[in-house]
Amino acid sequence: MPKPWLTSLEVSTPQEGYELAVLMARVAVKMTQPSDEIRRKLRTIYEQDADALIATSSVVATHFATVAAANNYWKE
Ligand code: HEM
């Protein structure tokens, strides 16, 4: 993760916005659990847990709402 890693919320397309939202969600996990080893261990659990995956979707949706608003919903 480069530093600084979040210099702007402005992106060209909704898809780029969604990718930024996923990145924002993942960075929060990395900041709160800096151990690669522990994250790898937890990944093997959540990748098979439908509720956890639905929860990740929800976190990403929240970030996406912020990014979309920051880009004025990509209206002309
Ligand atoms: C992989 C998203 C939470 C640990 C991934 C991948 C995505 C993702 C999209 C696939 C990357 C790829 O294969 O290209 C998210 C989102 C999360 C979340 C949106 C929460 C909202 C977590 C948590 C942990 C974790 C809670 C563990 C504490 C990992 C690890 C990998 C991974 C170790 C595999 C290695 C890597 O690609 O970096 N995650 N994740 N993630 N996630 Fe998560």
Image: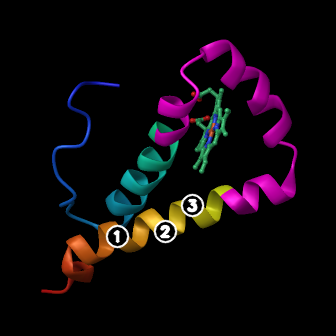
Residue 55 percent coordinates (x, y):
70, 60
Given contact means CB atoms under 8 Å apart, are the residues at marks 2 and 1 in contact? yes
* Figure check: 22 above or below 68: above
Q: How far, Cα to Cα, is label 2 from label 3?
A: 5 Å
The three-letter code of the residue at mark 1 reads Thr
Considering every residue shown, the one lying at the far left of the view is 76
Q: Residue at x 82, y 30 (%)?
A: 44
Total tally of numbered discs in the picture: 3
Q: Which residue is mark 3?
A: 59
Residue 65 percent coordinates (x, y):
40, 74
Given contact means CB atoms under 8 Å apart, are the residues at marks 2 and 3 in contact? yes
The three-letter code of the residue at mark 2 reads Thr
Q: Which residues are magenta?
A: 28-55
Mark 3 and mark 1 lie on one chain; the one further toward the N terminus is 3
Q: Which residue is mark 2?
A: 62
Q: Quadrant of the N terminus?
A: top left
Q: Residue at x 51, y 30 (%)?
A: 30
Front one among 26 and 76: 26
Q: Which mark is residue 39?
A: none
In terms of secondary structure, where does tag 3 sit?
helix
Q: How far, Cα to Cα, is label 2 from label 1?
A: 7 Å
Considering every residue shown, the one lying at the far front of the view is 32
Residue 7 percent coordinates (x, y):
16, 44
Dot 2: within a 10 Å radius of its alpha carbon, few (fewer than 14), some, or many (20 or more) residues? few
Q: Is mark 3 within 8 Å of ligand 1?
A: yes
Q: Is mark 2 within 8 Å of ligand 1?
A: no
- Majority secondary structure of magenta residues: helix
